[in-house]
Amino acid sequence: MKRDAQRLLVVTTVLVCIGIVMVYSSSSCYAYEQFYDSAFYLKRHLMHLAIAVLLAVFTLRFDYRKLRDRAGVLLLFSILSLVFVLLPGIGHEAGGARRWFRLGVLGFQPSEFAGLFLIIYLADILDRKQGCIKNFFYGFIPPLIISGLVVLLVLLQPDLGSAVAILTVSLIMMFVAGVKRRHLLSLLFVSIPALFVLIFRVPYRIKRIVGYLAPWGDAQGAGFQIVQSFLALGSGGIFGVGLGCSRQKLFYLPQAHTDFIFSIIGEELGLIGTLGIVLLFSAFVYLGMSISIKAKDLFGKFLAMGITLSIALKAIINIAVSTGAIPTKGLPLPFISYGGTALIFNIVAVALLLNIASK
């Protein structure tokens, strides 16, 4: 295994290990109150991790270049999954959103693997269309239509955070592949009215924006989550209150083991802990981009770049939400937050990066 791959494996392993500790620390009280088992979420997290490792081992032994022949099938599977999850009686509804399939004790979110499979498809089509990539109709429109379809289906769940992440990665991949800037700028300009409607015509999103702009003005309502996150991060200081000693996880901070696990890290491990997480993700991005640059074929370059951008963007959004830099979005912190599908497919994505680096 090459040096970049070895370092990436170490960084990912450290992030996963931190996740195991913090999932238990942040969820134990809530799990005991709900299920009389403080390790309930930890056990499920470890089960998902075991599945992820098995799939990662298979991915490492599979030549990533063979994915080109299966890119269309994987994308079709993603689109059908995103359609079926919207159907009553098939998709599982929770919190007003229909984003999950339930299979007994297991549940999975199709938008997670749809994002990865779309990256694989885009890497293939952008490679094949290099000869006409600057042409509006033949180089720009085909990948845009496919990306737009996936984004639209994710928006219907509704899941604006995942949709924005998927669209952003798609557009960056197209830009790097050689799509003309004026085509991308035209798309962004045309998208402004749609973005306005999606944000300012949906009541619960307006509520989130109000909570973001003036959280202390409605600390028991729209601003509750971000205020509790501020209290967690602020009380941690430089060195934290100690591992397992968080007060905000005691039924104050909602989704402490998922969306706001970074805040619990800040409270228990302090500024040192949060900076450590940021540095680990920075190292991940550096190593992922290094693998992309050194890949021997364009498909591998685009694939590695898309995977790295996807994981980096999710980490940035999660940390930005926890620190109040952007309005609340329901995206977990990669490798660290509790979340079965996200953990599985993030680790499989890393296995693909290692696969590309080894060729």
Image (cartoon, helix red, strand yellow):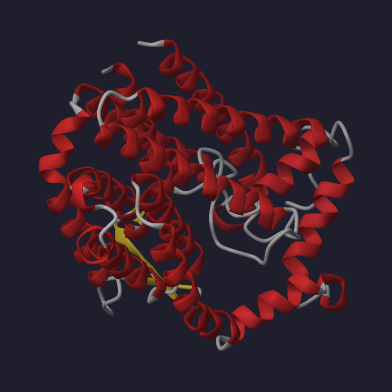
Looking at the rendered image, the quarter that the C terminus falls into is top left
Q: Is residue 46 left or right of residue 147?
A: right
- In-front residue for pair 267/200: 200
Q: Is residue 318 left or right of residue 310?
A: right
* Relative image position of residue 126 (x, y in whole percent): 25, 48
* Relative image position of residue 250 (x, y in whole percent): 75, 53
Looking at the rendered image, the quarter that the N terminus falls into is top left
Q: Is residue 98 left or right of residue 328?
A: left
* Relative image position of residue 101 (x, y in whole percent): 31, 62
* Residue plotted at (16% across, 59% down): 76
Up the image or down, 40 lies above or below 195; here it is above
- In-front residue for pair 334/278: 278
Q: Is residue 222 visible?
A: no
- In-front residue for pair 122/268: 122
* Residue plotted at (51% across, 18% down): 10
Up the image or down, 278 lies above or below 295; here it is below
* Relative image position of residue 260 (x, y in whole percent): 66, 53
- In-front residue for pair 123/18: 123
Q: Please give the count of numbered marks on the rendered protein.
A: 0
Q: Is residue 239 visible?
A: yes
* Residue plotted at (83% across, 73% down): 219
